[in-house]
Image (cartoon, helix red, strand yellow):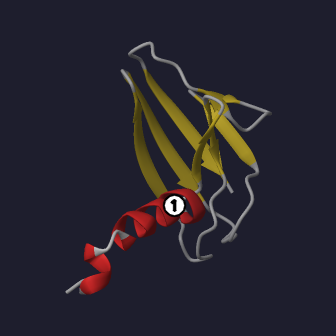
């Protein structure tokens, strides 16, 4: 049972906290960033994010057991040095792979 805290709006705060501060999905100025802060034993996780008509499939791999930090950022198998993606409304599917 969630109890009273689930009825007072704190559930939406928990949702935002997990998405933004644990999984690290952040949107700013039409750019998608990822800054995960996870337990070192998490080996990988996925996020499927839809922006208007476009789908972003995000796979985060953590082979070294890090808590934070991104080593590599790939968009459709091409490494992106800026480690961010501008959001598009083009109806396509984009695959992002991040290596911590």
In the picture, residue 31 is in which quadrant?
top right
Q: Position of residue 38 (x, y in %)?
A: 59, 70
> Is 79 situated left or right of 89 in this image?
right
In what element is the residue under mark 1? strand
Q: Residues within 10 Å of mark 1 (few under 14, many from 20)?
A: some
Q: Nearer the viewer, residue 79 or 26?
A: 26
| Residue position for label 1 | 44
The outermost residue toward the right is 81
Report x, y in % for residue 6: 28, 76
Question: From the viewer's perspective, is residue 6 above or below residue 29?
Answer: below
Q: Does residue 69 appear to the left or right of 41 in the view shown?
A: right
Q: Is residue 16 left or right of residue 97?
A: left
Question: Which of the 4 quarters of the picture holds residue 91?
Answer: top left
Image quarter of the N terminus: bottom left
Residue sitting at x 80%, y 33%: 81
Percent position of residue 46, x then y: 44, 52
Say which quadrant the C terminus sits in. bottom right
The residue closer to the viewer here, 14 or 36, is 14
Above or below residue 28? Residue 66 is below
Check the image and report above or below for 98 versus 83. below
């Amino acid at each position: 049972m969630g109890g009273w805290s689930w009825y007072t709006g704190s559930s939406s705060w928990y949702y935002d906290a997990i998405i933004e501060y644990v999984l690290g999905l952040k949107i700013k100025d039409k750019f998608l960033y990822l800054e995960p802060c996870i337990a070192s034993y998490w080996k990988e996780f996925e996020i499927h994010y839809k922006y208007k008509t476009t789908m972003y499939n995000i796979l985060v791999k953590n082979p070294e057991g890090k808590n934070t930090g991104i080593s590599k950022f790939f968009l459709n198998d091409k490494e992106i040095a800026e480690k961010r993606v501008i959001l598009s409304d083009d109806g396509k599917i984009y695959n992002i792979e991040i290596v911590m």
